[in-house]
Amino acid sequence: MTNPLYDTLFGQHDQRSAIFLQLPDGTTLTYAKFLEMAAQYAGYLTEVGLNAGDRVAVQIEKSPQALAVYAACAQAGLVFLPLNTAYTADETAYFVENSGSGIVLCDDFKRSDLAPIVKRFDAQLETLNADGSGSFAQHAASLPTAFETVTRSEADLAAFLYTSGTTGRSKGAMLSQANLLSNAQALREEWRFTSDDVLLHALPIFHTHGLFVASNITLLAGAQMIFLPKFDLDQMIAGMPRATTMMGVPTFYTRLLGDERFTQDLTNHMRLFISGSAPLLPETHAQFKDRTGHRILERYGMTETNMNTSNPYDGERRAGTVGFPLPGVELKITESQTGATLPQGEIGEIEVRGPNVFQGYWQMPEKTAEELRSDGFFITGDLGQIDADGYVSIVGRNKDLIISGGYNIYPKEIELLLDDQEGVLESAVIGVPHADFGESVVGVLVAMPGTTLDLEAILSNIGKSLARFKQPQKLFVLSELPRNSMGKVQKKALREQYSTIFQ
Ligand code: MCA
Ligand code: AMP
């Protein structure tokens, strides 16, 4: 194979007239047409001077065109770097600079915000809108609909996905072709995807879940997707009769259950519902079973590792667990400090090794060394336990992280901004239970002596540089933060104190 990722996921469908995407307006896109568009995009990316291994930063709304940029990068041997569309220009600037992207694609409405940034980093800015218009599409439209695939190997990098850290600085997780392919192959087999499947796809495609888990498996199987721009209850319910499978974060499932149109009849023909990215409450699993007769299959993954474990397709899908390690993935529970494997049943750090585990953080060898052991085991920062039957459960986190509606939010990043606000002495950001998002962000502030904080002004200020989903939903002021004898802020106590504010 000249380029395993492209050949396996895309190239095999080159001439296929079968439908790849069903779109909300009732139109469809065949594999062949999709790949013609991708080839034109690959042609343009090459024409502007990008070479194999160069990064392409993409912050565009979900659309077939956005997915075609991923295919184009694979075909031209470029590193695809998708960015959350909710990121502010400040946030995006960091990713563009850190990755050294040669080109940035954005929607037209973001162009004026991003232009000065992109210029500063000597990159090229082009636009690609969800309706297929924009400067990038215009240039590409005049190019041939076939492109000679650039030779690459499985060891070459395919994508960077940025993931924040406990220090507040995002790190570019480098994923190789082999990382993506091995995981897609394992999941397709585990979940039995075939060309008869139609996946109801409402996840964003700038994260592992919607891009690599959902789209790569569909492509590998030659299946179809009902490709929705975002989660919308009416569209989900309208699309379900045409689907065979669905993937979602727990919020998708609680929202569906909250709608009386979501009935057993609507789901009778469905083959599989999969959940991940955040803990699925056993109550949700049970309610879903009662309502539809289906047992949601829960799995566990990370940006750095793709998917690690899955509940079984056949056999018991055990609520509150994330199932068994996938074929080829080794998983152990260790003592955090020493890395020593703990006896079965004990709670400890989850470590994983396998072809799914990433290549390290872009230009951050120290960070890589902190989390990736020399023997190849990745320290996930999740606390887990393996029961007597081998089912893995995630029981907590050894990292300060909030997961809201499936998006990861690192408190440190927000605390650094809050600490800089006028009159703030110090701050602590915590996640508290939220019926819709699972967890929601709350900030606790301590004012400088003699100061009264203007909470509205603080929220509005940090909102200028912080994506909306990361912004605290509420701010509270305390005279001091609870600390232990070592002086460490007791976030657990704060979480308990504010645990019912969104209930
Ligand atoms: C939107 N908002 C949020 C979130 N999403 N706030 C907190 N948490 C969120 N997740 C805010 C918006 O800024 C807006 O604020 C208001 O909620 C409504 O916005 P809207 O766009 O209408 O929201 P929505 O469509 O209802 O979106 C909620 C959602 C979405 C459907 C749950 O967040 C979503 O699709 N999440 C999936 C994330 C995902 O794919 N994660 C996978 C990561 P305001 O009204 O105040 O302006 S990959 C991963 O984790 C690993 C590898 C894994 O295992 O999969
Ligand atoms: P990210 O690397 O940003 O994509 O987020 C990965 C994190 O999401 C993991 O380290 C877990 O903490 C969490 N996660 C993913 N899937 C699950 C799940 N099924 N149950 C609980 N947490 C999960």
Image (cartoon, grey):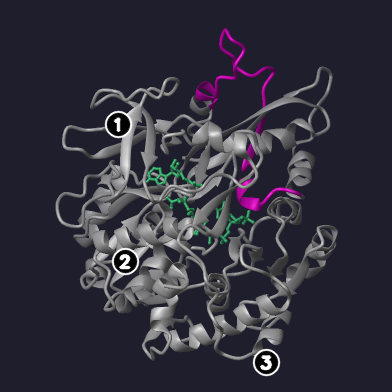
Mark 1 C-beta to ligand 2 under 8 Å: no
Mark 3 C-beta to ligand 1 under 8 Å: no
| Residue at the image position 48 percent from the left and 50 percent from the top | 406
Q: Which residue is mark 1?
A: 385
Question: Principal SS element in the magenta part?
Answer: loop
Mark 1 falls on what kind of element? strand
Left or right of residue 358: residue 109 = right
The label shown at residue 98 is: none
The one of 259 and 50 positioned closer to us in this rendering: 50
Q: Would you say residue 187 sits in the magenta stretch?
A: no
Q: Which residues are magenta?
A: 465-494
Instruction: Between label 2 and label 1, give the one nearer the viewer.
Output: 1
How many numbered discs, if any? 3
The label shown at residue 262 is: 2
Left or right of residue 286: residue 126 = right
For the N terminus, give its image quadrant: bottom left
